[in-house]
Amino acid sequence: MPIDTMTIKELENKTFFVPSFQRGYRWTEHEVSALFDDIEEFSTNEGKQRYCLQPLMVKIGGDGSYEVVDGQQRLTTIFIFLKIATCEIPGIKIPFDLSYKTREKTHQLLTNLAAEDEIDETSIDNFHITKARETINQWLKLRPDRIIAIMNIYTKLMESVYFIWYELPKDSDTIVMFTKVNMGKIPLTSAELIKALFLNRDNFRANSKTESDIEKRQIEIALEWDRIEHGLHEDIFWYFLNEEEKSGTRIDLLFELLADEYNEKLVKRISKDQRNYSFLVFLNNMKQRKGEEEAFVKELWEKVQKLFAEFRDWYDDLDKYHMIGYLIESGTKIPEIFTFTRNKRKSMVEGDLRKEISKKINLKLDKNSLSNHILTSNTKSKIRTLLLLFNIASLVNKGEKQYRFPFYIYKSKAKDGLQWDIEHIHATADTTDEPDDTLGNLTLLESVTNRSPKYAAETFNIKRNYILEKESSGLFVPLCTKNIFLKAYTDTPENMDKWEDDDKEGYLEAMEKTFKTFFTGGQ
């Protein structure tokens, strides 16, 4: 499946047609204006940066013309603008031709389109095309100089605006492909484009004796690709590495991490904020290594596999899992974590991770200092981070490594519109005592439970019963939060119905001891 990038100028002498089964041109004023706003605002950075129009999926016909499977709305909008430009500025030409199959009137309208005229309501296609022309003209009228505005857009279109050229095999069923694309079954993310780049049969021809050899190599990569994608779709694994949900292709993560390395190898580097950045980096690397396509695919694919295996190693080692998961949750980027984990002995890796966590916390962790932490709007983030670390450190310190902190639950709450509250163990709304915003009275609890009328202002013993009941029904309650309501940090609890000063004292002492053990590695 040939895949490349093509500027509008590089579409020169190509003829495109929109097949009869497609509904025709339907862009509204909003889409048309948004496109030209984007092109106008985008900076070429003296020719170093280009604007991507997303894929133009086509299939070549026997007469050399191209059937447009996906991308007709943008292609037609650009054609309409170029028609206006040719009418007003001598010497400007439209590089490509465009027609609508079985819609002769639409083809005639596009061919003879004037710069300005009335809205044509003789057909639905003609209405939308002439409405788009009117929108472009209104957009141009808002610029200080119409001719300069046309020339600026025209120059960008010819030199810096491009499609990702996605050419289907000649024997493919275009109706099936069109249906899949428009039902969202083919998410043309960078990873999907890279997959098409990798699996192009031409990559394997030089070292393959038969077509079956080529097919075997394609199947090997495709099966391994699916295995990695499937692994990344395990939420417990994905959220350990990531903050955000990604419902489409998750293997993008691996390519994005490798793209920076390969961008350094390019004669002309790709801007990181370029759309489809990783795909463009690998496409241009392949072009730069023309004749070595198979070697390039083999090299890059081995790095993808190695990177995935590295992540699985982090995940399978519970100490690494907890410490790395905490750092990522605290904002450390994966490339930074590589500096602590690569080419080092395990003991050194764990020591470096602890040092980095200590830098992140940047707090004194003795009991007296901990007792002085008070919840305010300015300290909320630090206290939440500290309470999470107490949970993580408690698990790392355990002799028997059986429990895995569920980052996928902790992080996915935000996806569901929820969050982790800093809970007052003894309720501030409880009128039987003074409100207490110090750390000894604070713990983590998810917001649904914490803000429930059955829980929010209740006494300690009612809260405990409610939390234990929720946990027994499957709700995740952080280990340290559960320990608090069981009074596990109080040496000799005398009153199980209240959270009192000696309970707060024992809680802070447990924190100090846990952090000391964690940061010294148990030494």
Image: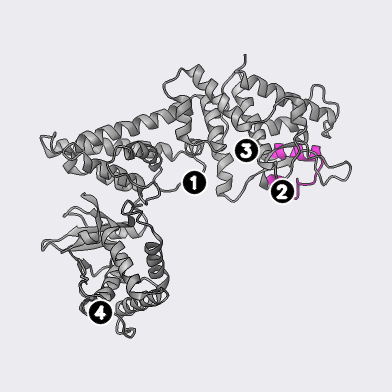
Q: Please tell me whether mark 2 sits on a helix, a strand or a loop.
A: loop
Q: Amino acid at mark 3?
A: Phe
For label 1, the crowd category at 10 Å Cα-Cα, with few meaning under 14, some 14 to 19 and many 20 or more, is some
Residue that label 3 marks: 476
Residue visible at 73% across and 24% down in the picture: 366
Question: Quick one: label 1 or label 4, which is nearer the N terminus?
Answer: 4
| Spot occupied by residue 448 in the image (x, y as percentages of width and height) | 67, 47
Are the residues at dot 3 and dot 1 in contact (C-beta closer than 8 Å)? no
Most foreground residue, 383 or 490: 383
- Which range of residues does the magenta coloring cover? 449-469
Judge left or right: residue 462 versus residue 271: right
Q: Quarter holding the C terminus?
A: top right
Residue that label 1 marks: 245
For label 3, the crowd category at 10 Å Cα-Cα, with few meaning under 14, some 14 to 19 and many 20 or more, is some
For label 2, the crowd category at 10 Å Cα-Cα, with few meaning under 14, some 14 to 19 and many 20 or more, is some
Q: Amino acid at mark 2?
A: Arg
Most foreground residue, 281 or 249: 281
Residue that label 2 marks: 451
Q: Which mark is residue 113?
A: 4
Label 3 and label 1: CA atoms lie apart by: 19 Å
**Can residue 507 be seen in this snapshot?**
no
Judge left or right: residue 469 versus residue 416: right
The nearer-to-camera label among 3 and 1 is 1
Label 4 and label 2: CA atoms lie apart by: 62 Å
The nearer-to-camera label among 4 and 3 is 4
